[in-house]
Amino acid sequence: MTATTAAASEKIPVTVLTGYLGAGKTTLLNRILSEPHGKRYAVIVNEFGEIGIDNELVVGADEEVFEMNNGCICCTVRGDLIRIMEGLVKRKGKFDAIILETTGLADPAPVAQTFFVDEDVQNNARLDAVVTVADAKWLSARLRDAPEAKNQIAFADVIILNKTDLVSTAELREVEARIRAINPYARLHPAQKCNVEISEVLERRAFDLDRILEIEPEFLEPEDHDHDHNGHDHHHDHDHGLKHYHDEDMQSISARIEGELDPNKFMPWINQLTQSQGPNILRCKGIVALKDDPKRFVFQGVHMMLDGEPQRDWKPGEKRESKVVFIGRDLDEAEIRKGFLACVA
Amino acid sequence: MADAPTTSLTDNVAPIEAGAHVVTAAFLDGAPTLALADGAILVGAPGAQRRLEAHPGGAVLAAACDGARLITGGDDGRIVATQATGEPELIAEEKSRWIDAVAARAGAIAWSAGKTARARDSAGVVKSWTAPTTVRGLCLLPKGYRLALAHYNGVSLWFPNAAAEPTLLEWKGSHLDATCSPDGRFLVTSMQENALHGWRLADSRNMRMTGYPGKTRSMSWSHDGYWLATSGADACVIWPFKDKDGPMGKPPRECGVRASRITQVACHPRALVVAIGYSDGLALLCRLGDGAEILVRREAPGEGAISALAWDERGARLLIGLDSGRAGLLTLPG
């Protein structure tokens, strides 16, 4: 058997690097490529020349966002990504992972949706994580005037809050709180010149249903999320003197039921919700206990795209409970909670 | 050949170790030729091949053959012409670009990189056009010097030697590969949306061919031009194009039904027989008339999918390539 076949069973991980103009995406990319990690990366960029590392597999992308003609209004994909993946797959075995850098104004959703929609991409590659680089000094302002910047924060699995040396401690806390108001679930790493451990950026498996809880033990418990700093709190705990923000536009909603759901109520509800609210829901995730099912049902989604499957068995003694999380724009929290609670078995 | 008293021709296949994903198979003046994802081209009979480094350090991304020359486009931006003898010839180079599609016919060559499309006539004169979006598929039409370019939301028909802007055949969605019926009446594209779309060129009438579970990436016209065999399903779907309306209102024929996705199809150049390759590495011949099947290659776990099929001019030999780097040459008995 040739090397290419041997590698064929492994899907190539794809890390998406986003971030508003000037936040430091290229710095992070160069940092990843210059580490002595012994791995070979194929890098998809929009502009050549900014990468300071010689890499034979640097691919220029056009960031062509297409609407799929399938009746789904928010189903946009990156046409160029499908084409590039087709070419890269032919060179399988020549590299270990793909890093895709988007432009500063890009919406991460079409990239993520490409992995849900295109069968060939899905068969050969897996979305590892959306990593957003944010500028500690300017992010607060951008969150006010640039919807793209807010999308990138809301969508992220990992946020590198860069250039912390340019702000005071108070300013840093404020921008962290603003990030948490939008996305309390992402891993947040304050950094200078993007000096984060590469392991915090790559191989996150953030979209892997099997790993949803194992990799995010702080799931739904944002107050414990960030170990690099004193815990800051989004929901209720003001004891540490940290600011609490509510973003007018983008919210995260989490709901929990201490018990089982009726699959005949839950499945139609989640499908209907993501169909009708899909354009506003950027990300969703959940782990639910379905009645008479020994396995945990795990799902995640991007806009209208949903991916769900029975995961591992509930462990003996493990509390069978159901949790869901939505991050999105103008979400009707009361309505979502009501709908979820009505799914109780 | 279809009357061969056997149901298996697996013993008639000479194995070839190509060593890299086979992107395209072809016969160059009768010599079996494989274009590979490691940038090389293998020319010659099994065991006596020449390895030509057409895209050193690169990969062949697209290829087309006009019988005498194999035109390959690589991720090194090079367009290379290879013949049965001699060294590969560099035709053009698109610096730091990937070549997404190529076409070749009667001495003319066309290629695209992103939105840039170029056509080169047999005298070597190159004309360029910028498409509205990235060009995914190219087809030189059988009549005149005219190029069809498949892109997002339709196909553009371009006369490279005319000053006029290309004609747009509009259809919503992302169009991938383009092929034209041998008589020049119909143009068909495969689509990202798991469908084919066709146009009757005389009046631009639309034809939708849907129902595929996957993308169609291989299409082949029967020698008489009346049938279009297609990949993308667990059966070889064959659309009728004999009548003036083409397949409109008619169901397609299906043959070679198996529990495996069809990845490649190649119609025999003289008989109504189609060679079919599957994602599990199996290949067979199927007679359009009655669906009778002859096994050519057994499925082999771990050996990948059939990624290329080509008949020689007489239809006596079938060249088979897989994405695992395996390959084989079938020689029909008699």
Image: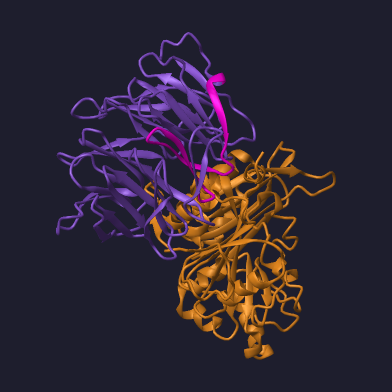
| Residue A231 placement: quadrant | bottom right
Q: Is residue A241 left or right of residue B208?
A: right
Q: Main secondary structure of the magenta part?
A: strand
Residue A51: x %, y % from top left: 55, 74
Above or below, B273 relative to A108: above
Residue B17 counted in the magenta span? yes
Q: Which chain is the one coloured orange? A: A
Residue A304: x %, y % from top left: 49, 52
Above or below, A233 relative to B131: below
Q: Quadrant of the C terminus of chain A?
A: top right
User: What residue lies at 45% left-to-right and 28% top-to-bottom?
Assistant: B318
The residue sitting at the top extreme is B5
- In the depicted view, which residue is nearer to us: B73 or B247? B73
- In the depicted view, which residue is nearer to us: B283 or A337? B283
Residue B42: x %, y % from top left: 50, 42
Residue A312 counted in the magenta span? no
User: What residue range appears in magenta?
Assistant: B11-40
Q: Is residue B228 left or right of residue B280?
A: left
Residue A49: x %, y % from top left: 49, 75
Residue B166 in sight from this viewpoint: yes
Q: Which chain is the one coloured purple? A: B
| Residue B180 placement: quadrant | top left
The residue sitting at the front extreme is B86
Q: Quadrant of the N terminus of chain A?
A: top right
User: What residue lies at 24% left-to-right and 59% top-to-bottom?
Assistant: B127
